[in-house]
Image (spheres, rainbow, N blue to C red):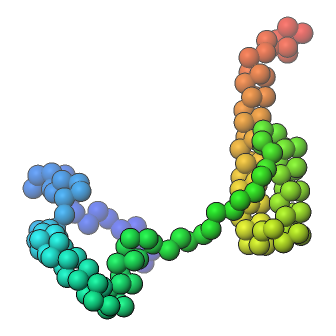
Amino acid sequence: MNAPRGRPFPAGNKQGRGRPKGSGNKARSEVQQLIDECALPLTRKCISFAAQGDRSAMRLLMDRISPARRDACIRMSLPSIRTAQDVDKAAEKVTQAIRRGDIAPVEGETMMKILEMRAGIITTAQLESRIEKLEAAPDVVSRSS
């Protein structure tokens, strides 16, 4: 009942290499070609409607010209972060900024996540450096034997 499945097809491809990677479907490429041919006249028509006051056309064009930003930039001065102590100082500054109302708690959470990732990178780099030093050091155990 729980026997492993066999190969659904015999080994080896007798029909050739198949379609190259990245090649699209024929029908899809024909549709894309039609869209490409109509893009310019449709864009001009949409601009014409927008110029005549059509709000839907205006919204469509403005979304293309200037899309809404997903997240606002967080403007905050932090110290240079090279050590775990620097991460601690930066985290304290973020906490104080949240407490003062300079940044929103959601923005503070984003900053803390970034600082946490930076701390992980610093820790990994320090561990790698220590391992390299240990590997480069002469073998102390073999001398004492």
Q: In this view, does 1 lie to the left or right of 82?
A: left
Q: In which quarter of the image is residue 97?
A: bottom right
**Quadrant of image for the C terminus:** top right
Identified at 18% across, 73% down, the residue is: 39
Residue 124: x percent and y percent?
73, 40
When the figure is inspected, residue 49 is found, relative to residue 17, above or below; the finding is below
Residue 70: x percent and y percent?
55, 71
Q: Is residue 84 left or right of residue 74?
A: right
Between residue 115 and residue 145, name the one nearer to us.
115
Q: Quadrant of residue 63?
A: bottom left
Between residue 119 and residue 69, name the one nearer to us.
69
Residue 90: x percent and y percent?
83, 52
Between residue 142 and residue 6, name the one nearer to us.
142
Identified at 11% across, 52% down, the residue is: 16
Residue 53: x percent and y percent?
32, 90
| Picture mark count | 0
**Quadrant of image for the N terminus:** bottom left
Q: In this view, does 47 lie to the left or right of 84?
A: left
Q: Is residue 1 visible?
A: yes
Identified at 16% across, 57% down, the residue is: 19
Identified at 22% across, 76% down, the residue is: 43
Q: Can residue 27 be seen in this view?
A: no
When the figure is inspected, residue 79 is found, relative to residue 15, above or below; the finding is above
Q: Is residue 33 left or right of residue 58?
A: left
Q: In which quarter of the image is residue 31?
A: bottom left
